[in-house]
Image (cartoon, helix red, strand yellow):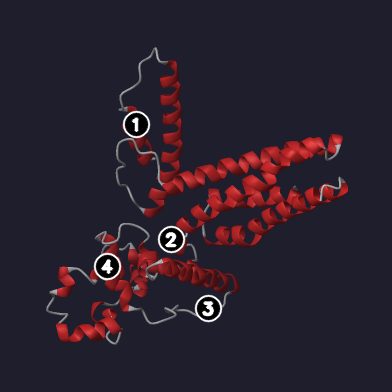
Amino acid sequence: MASALLGALLSLVLFLHAGPYTLVAFMFLAQPLLLLGMLLFAVQVFKDLRREKLL
Amino acid sequence: MIEYRRVYKSFDGAPRSNGSNHAGVVWSRAMRLLTSLLATSSAGAAAAEGDIALRPHGWVGTTDDWARGLGIAFVFLAAVILVLAWRRVRETGLTPRIKELLILPLVVLPAAIVFFGYSHGIESSKTVESCGSCHVMKPYLDDLRNPDSEALAATHYKNRYIQEHHCYTCHTDYGMFGTVHAKWEGLGHVRRHLTGDYTLPIKIAHPYPNRRCLGCHGQSQKFLKSEGHPKEDMPKLLSGENSCIDCHGPAHTPAAAAQTASR
């Protein structure tokens, strides 16, 4: 959740002030952070499904 | 600000809905609010480009304005839901209800944010301001905007031969891979600027290809029928053996702009 929040806030910087540095920060920091949040959430869901013996 | 007033006025002048029609009034007010918000953001972009063009009646912003607006809205929505979910998790732990709620800010909204982020970021990176945001480019920008400059780029700029994205239009090959290549080189420019890995005066990395000029001028009668472009020289021009810049240059005169500025 913290990763996704940080990623979203970094993306906000790009939306408020678009420039080469903010675009690079968005591409190489915000995007991986958002992806990390998504992956960790997917892992948690996967674990739950395994625990419930649905997978 | 001028832009904002003009757009707002033009929308204000639209025929209002009947007062008895409540839904119509609400819709009209909502549209006015949305339009003025978009106008404010597009006014910033227009002012940044030095553009004071009047917008058409009923202007609701460009695709980029909408991408920016929606991106900001989705970031706020994701942040609010994440903060609320965080507080609930601290109180009750990670319940199935919270997990369901988290699908939105952790899966759906990030995908939308990335989409609109690229949409807005790539579009914004084409502006003159974006190219000029590195201090080494300032003399080039000054030259470009100098109405007294006779450089090729300044001539195109002051006569509005190119409507917008003046640097990008001339420094990018045509087609999708032209854009991809330009963005890739742009990343290299950011790296060099951050690490200081460049020497002054900066020079163009590769010889300027004629196809960028010919993309606009190639089919024009002024080019085809000009005495300066005899038919026997066409193969040399098309193959790049003769450069357009050789006769029509210099493309930029940053040193002259710096002298003008120091006077």
Tell me the distance, in whole angstroms, between the alpha carbons under discs 2 and 3.
Answer: 22 Å
Above or below, comparing residue B79 to residue A17 in the picture: above
Tell me the distance, in whole angstroms, between the alpha carbons under discs 4 and 3.
Answer: 32 Å
| Residue at 44% over, 59% down | B129
The x, y position of residue B182, in whole percent, is: 46, 69
Q: Secondary structure at mark 3?
A: loop
The disc, 4 or 2, on the residue closer to the chain's N-terminal end is: 2
Query: Are marks 1 and 4 in one subunit?
Result: yes
The x, y position of residue B44, in whole percent, is: 43, 46
Dot 3 amino acid type: Tyr
Dot 4 amino acid type: Cys
Above or below, comparing residue B120 to residue B75 in the picture: below
Q: Badge 4, how many Cα within 10 Å: few under 14, some, many 20+?
A: few
User: Chain ID for label 3?
Assistant: B
Where does the N terminus of chain B fall, quadrant-wise?
A: top left
Dot 2 amino acid type: Lys
Q: Which residue is mark 1?
A: B11
Q: Which residue is mark 4?
A: B216
Q: Is residue B73 left or right of residue B47?
A: right
Q: Badge 3, how many Cα within 10 Å: few under 14, some, many 20+?
A: some
Which mark is nearer the camera, 1 or 4?
4
Residue B211 appears in view = yes
Report the number of discs.
4
Tell me the distance, in whole angstroms, between the alpha carbons under discs 1 and 4.
Answer: 35 Å
In which quadrant of the rendered view does residue B26 lie? top left
Q: Which residue is mark 2?
A: B126
Which mark is nearer the camera, 4 or 2?
4
| Residue at 63% over, 52% down | A10
- Contact, CB < 8 Å: mark 4 with mark 2? no
